[in-house]
Image (tube, rainbow, N blue to C red):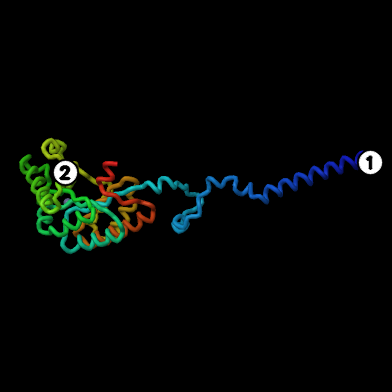
């Protein structure tokens, strides 16, 4: 009789344990215990082919910014097409224009300005500044700024020296901020859309400055693909001013 009672108690305890486990499983407590760390169901990440091994970093994705910049324009054929595509995509770019080309295409400069792009100085005749006298350097820069000022009513604040050739001493007499780049697409060299896009996507990270030239059709087509791809990855396109000042 005593043995029978002990057996009965054991069976009862086992039943209670099984029932308790079922109750927890039924409420889903086990399923959601790690719910806070699981990625939300987001089509962007699923479509991107992300595997479970990849780390989900929503904050980084939201904050990534990039500036797209165009040198050597404006170009009467390609710059208007570029401006149209930038407008369609809601992107503000930064243009470093050549003074003599700006003078020949004032309407394009005006449109750039009115559409909120940054217009920077890329010298008057695209010369390597470090090969010039101090006076000639000043003339190349001030002549270009004057052209831009006469069209837009605003003096440009940013300068990009051709070939990246700059001497900090210039800043004593030229009150401008030099802006270089961090991602060189070599668009002028390859004139190949795939190569331009691949170089840009491979090199871009948060706060990158991409260098392109708006005087080639391949560069304009490449720019649109770069923008579309990086926007899909969560990048926000800003001007160099926004990137440098914020
Ligand atoms: Zn240039």
| Residue 145 spot, x, y in % from top left | 12, 48
| Residue 123 spot, x, y in % from top left | 12, 48
- Mark 2, residues whose alpha carbon is within 10 Å: few (<14), some, or many (≥20)? few
* Residue 75 located left or right of residue 40: left
* Residue labelled with disc 1: 1
> Ligand 1 near label 1 (Cβ, under 8 Å)?
no
Which tag is nearer the camera, tag 1 or tag 2?
1
Judge whether 80 appears above or below 34 on screen.
below
| Residue 7 spot, x, y in % from top left | 87, 42
- For the C terminus, the quadrant is top left
Judge whether 228 appears above or below 131 on screen.
below
Q: Any mark on residue 165, and which?
A: 2
Q: Residue at x 21, y 50 (%)?
A: 118
* Residue 136 located left or right of residue 121: left
Q: 16 or 155: which is nearer to us? A: 155
Q: 133 or 95: which is nearer to us? A: 95
- Mark 1, residues whose alpha carbon is within 10 Å: few (<14), some, or many (≥20)? few
Q: Is residue 218 visible?
A: no
């Amino acid at each position: 009789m005593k043995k029978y009672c002990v057996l009965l108690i054991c069976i009862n305890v086992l039943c209670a344990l099984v029932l308790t486990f079922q109750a927890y499983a039924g409420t889903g407590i086990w399923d959601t215990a790690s719910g806070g760390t699981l990625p939300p169901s987001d089509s962007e990440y699923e479509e991107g082919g992300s595997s479970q091994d990849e780390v989900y970093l929503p904050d980084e994705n939201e904050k990534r910014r990039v500036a797209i910049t165009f040198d050597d324009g404006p170009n009467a054929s390609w710059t208007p097409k570029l401006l149209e595509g930038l407008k369609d995509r809601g992107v503000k770019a930064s243009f470093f224009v050549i003074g003599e080309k700006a003078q020949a295409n004032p309407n394009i400069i005006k449109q750039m300005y009115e559409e909120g792009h940054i217009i920077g100085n890329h010298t008057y005749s695209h010369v390597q500044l470090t090969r010039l006298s101090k006076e000639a350097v000043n003339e190349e820069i001030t002549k270009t700024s004057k052209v831009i000022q006469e069209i837009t009513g605003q003096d440009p604040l940013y300068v990009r020296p051709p070939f990246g050739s700059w001497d900090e001493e210039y800043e004593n007499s030229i009150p401008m901020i030099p802006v270089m780049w961090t991602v060189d697409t070599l668009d002028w060299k390859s004139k190949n859309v795939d190569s331009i896009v691949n170089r840009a996507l491979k090199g871009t990270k948060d706060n990158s400055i991409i260098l392109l030239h708006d005087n080639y059709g391949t560069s304009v087509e490449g720019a649109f693909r770069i923008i579309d791809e990086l926007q899909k990855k969560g990048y926000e396109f800003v001007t160099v001013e926004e990137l440098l000042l914020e």
